[in-house]
Amino acid sequence: MNQITVIGLGAGDINQLPLGVYKKLLNSEKIFVRTIDHPVISDLVNEGIQFVSFDNIYERHETFQPVYEEITDVLIESSKVQSIIYAVPGHPLVAEQTVQLLIAAERNGKIELHIEGGQSFLDSTFAALKIDPIEGFQLFDGTSFSIHDVNMRAHLLIAQVYDTYSASEVKLTLMEKYLDDYPVTVVTAAGSSLETLKTVPLYELDQVIEINNLTTIYVPPVKGFEEALRDWTTFRTIVSTLRGPDGCPWDKEQTHESLKKYLIEEAHEFLAAVDEQDDFGMVEELGDVLLQVFLHAQIGEDEGYFNLEEILASISEKMIRRHPHVFGEVSVNSADDVVKNWESIKKQEKGEQEGSILKGEYRAGSSLQTSYNYQKKAATVGFDWPNVNDAWEKFEEEWQEFREEIKNGSIKTRIDEFGDVLFTLVNIARFYKISPEEAMIHANEKFSRRFQYVEKKVKQSGKPFSEFTLEQLDLFWDEAKHMEKGE
């Protein structure tokens, strides 16, 4: 089997080319290069070395992956005739997708591959920027990297930024986390006589003229909280600081128990923002909910019982386990199938439960939610009305019993029967897939909005409430109602 030898042309001009690589090129008959658009190629051509370039393949495709695949196929076919040299910019094992495809081909027994060195563009880039990589750095492909993988506290290098369009895409991605005016440096032809460095605010990144296939974008590490407000690590550090020795007295005193009411309140405020379709409100209220989650996680870490990583691992594992139709081989036909699978997997996870099946369904903060949970759980073992009509009949029965107690009963019996009425209403809500808790929250908010309008009209009149009849106040209420409906 003939051999494919991959060599690196380095990151700059011929002065940076290793002597061994130079001799190899001089003594080779068949040399392929991914592109002739590299400083060292013109110098080597002047010395009589001939190359076969793959630049024409780039012109046939709109994206890079099919280009790399076609180059790999041509190299494999050519190696069937004779051993060949394949020269790539920089080092063969740094940011070179065609070499990775060749490595895969060798593992499958298609070729015999030999990789020789070459100077990586990283060495020259580090030297040009005067940074030490031991401080921590990340290298990304500008055509495909995700902002979710970025560590804002490390040196960030982005390669494959070769024109204005790719620079614009990188800019937009970075602006998902970094400030618009965050300083970034455009490094071009590092280590060569054509080396240039230009630092610009992020929003001007795609306006730099020097961008070409020898360009690397450098983003320095953030220094303070204000530069990284969209980073998870920042928020975690803020919460940790608040509960630390020099933190806030109030935050340091909080416990899981003391924070319970705030989590409920913040969840309700988020639901209100959802009902109002207030996107900005949802952002703010979700932030408040997130604060509660992080506070509880920090308390767990402070007390040595659990930390945020354990919380993430727990929910991640659960989501993977309970979505085998996404992360496994299970097939589903509808959302109902998903729910059935979920409950089945949940039952398997928990095993046979000892004691009442209602265990764990009580919610101290909401009697409505407790009622809903109890009835839903009981229904799983068949303790349920066959259809909603029976539920309605039970409601009418309980309503009549309550009316009888209003006429003839005591306070205690009236409370008891009214509780039965509410319980049957929760059951009806369950049949119609309505959350009674959410419905009650919505009703309270609606009452609050409309009554505040009534208060506003009374105040505008300059008279006290006592001078208005119920009919007059009800007119204000109707005005608020019509305004909400856009009538």
Image (cartoon, grey):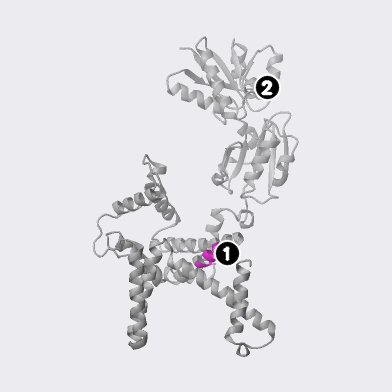
Q: Quadrant of the N terminus?
A: top left
The correct choice, above or below, for 354 with respect to 91 in the image is: below
Q: Residues within 10 Å of mark 2 (few under 14, many from 20)?
A: many
Task: Point out the stretch of residues depicted in magenta.
Answer: 268-274
Q: How many marks?
A: 2
Work out whether residue 11 can be spotted. yes
Tag shown at residue 276: 1
User: Residue 132 location in percent, x, y?
Assistant: 60, 41
Q: Earlier in the sequence, mark 2 or mark 1?
A: 2
Residue 269 horizontal side relative to residue 383, left or right: right
Q: Residue at x 63, y 41 (%)?
A: 131
What is the number of the mark on residue 40? 2
Residue at figure coordinates x 37%, y 78% from the top left: 418
Question: Could you say whether the residue bearing mark 1 is in a helix, strand or loop?
Answer: loop
Question: The C terminus appears in which quarter of the rendering?
Answer: bottom right
Residue 72: name its quadrant.
Answer: top right
Confirm whether residue 130 shows in the render.
Answer: no
Residue 255: x %, y % from top left? 44, 69
Front in this rendered view, residue 338 or 349:
338
| Residue type pointed to by label 1 | Glu
Front residue (pair 145, 198): 145
Q: SS class of the residue under badge 2?
A: helix
Q: Is residue 271 magenta?
A: yes
